[in-house]
Image (cartoon, rainbow, N blue to C red):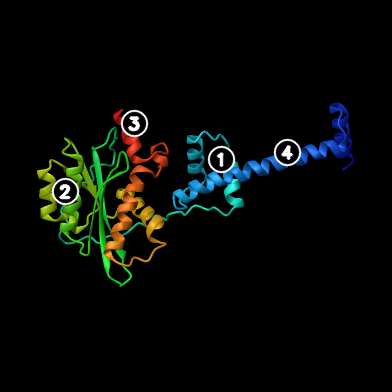
Amino acid sequence: MNRGKHRLSLMCRVYDVTRDGYYAWRRRGDSLRKQEDSELFEVIHAIFKQHDGNYGSPKILRELRKKGIRIGQKRVARIMQEHGLKATKARIYHSKPGISKYVRKCPNRILDIELTAPNQLWVGDVTYLKLEDGTWQYLSVIMDRFSRRILSWSLSDRRDVKLTLSALGRAVRNRGHHEGLIFHSDRGVEYLAYKYRERLKRHGVEQSMNRVKEMNDNAFMESFFQQFKTERIKRRILKSADHLRGIIIEYMRYYNFERSHSSIDYVSPVEFEGRIEA
């Protein structure tokens, strides 16, 4: 304690200031930093709300730097913690689809694939969503795995080949035909159906499927569905199929055009594809 007081006295003599002057300077510094933190919180909170509470400090730091605000991640994290801003996190749930007697032998063609551009590998999957009245809706989605862009989706009250064919047709209309394109999915019967396999062949698309008992082979789609449910569905009561459809339309636009992804340099899928094309 005495050593600390002696050091303070020495500093005051060196800089020719009184102890009262030193303490007043310290208070002004603390006050200024609190004011800066308060102003930063307003910007951080706006970004946090814009992304529906799904951005943590790393992504918010990226958004701040886009605005020309240069601060450290630790300071962002501290401000968020002080104000109770905690990002919603998705848990990855690995589903265990049954193997139907109709399963055809189809290899996993993407184990060692190296992607260099969009339209080399599309991935698809189906998830289910429960409405307020207890009925179910099924959502089929196709993603470009290189850019993470959602290419198409289809919603129905039946999980059948019509559902997945609808999503496939929209993806082809949106992106066109591409030589060497692979479509990968799990071994669900809607992807093993004769009509689906024939439609892929007609479009010149090679089919790939998860290995038996290997649920992580389509992890990108599983991750997308968990993000969607965490960021939009978990906090809502789905009153009707039309209500759900409106939520999906809004989220797909947000996901493709605004939501940043750490795996593609913290930009949106549309911006990432724009960089590749430029």
Q: Secondary structure at mark 1?
A: helix
The amino acid type, in three-letter code, at marker 2 is Gly
Q: What is the CA distance from the residue labelled 4 to the residue labelled 3? A: 43 Å
Q: Is residue 28 left or right of 229 when viewed as pictured?
A: right
Query: Badge 4: how crowded within 10 Å, few (<14), some, or many (20+)?
Result: few
Residue 126 circle label: none
Q: Outermost residue, bottom direction?
A: 133
Residue 73 circle label: 1
Q: Looking at the image, is mark 1 or mark 2 earlier in the sequence?
A: 1
Q: What is the CA distance from the residue labelled 3 to the residue labelled 2? A: 27 Å
Residue 29 circle label: 4
Q: Secondary structure at mark 2?
A: helix
Measured from the top left, where is residue 104 in percent x and y? 15, 54
Instruction: Give the residue pinned by disc 3.
Output: 275
Who's the residue at 63% across and 41% down the image?
36
Q: Is residue 119 left or right of 77 when viewed as pictured?
A: left
Measured from the top left, where is residue 68 in percent x and y? 52, 33
The amino acid type, in three-letter code, at marker 3 is Arg
Whether residues under marks 3 and 2 lie with C-beta atoms below 8 angstroms apart, the answer is: no
The amino acid type, in three-letter code, at marker 4 is Gly
Q: Looking at the image, is mark 3 or mark 2 earlier in the sequence?
A: 2
Whether residues under marks 1 and 2 lie with C-beta atoms below 8 angstroms apart, the answer is: no
The quarter of the picture where residue 95 lies is bottom left
Q: Looking at the image, is mark 1 or mark 4 earlier in the sequence?
A: 4
Q: Is residue 270 visible?
A: yes
Instruction: Give the residue pinned by disc 2.
Output: 169
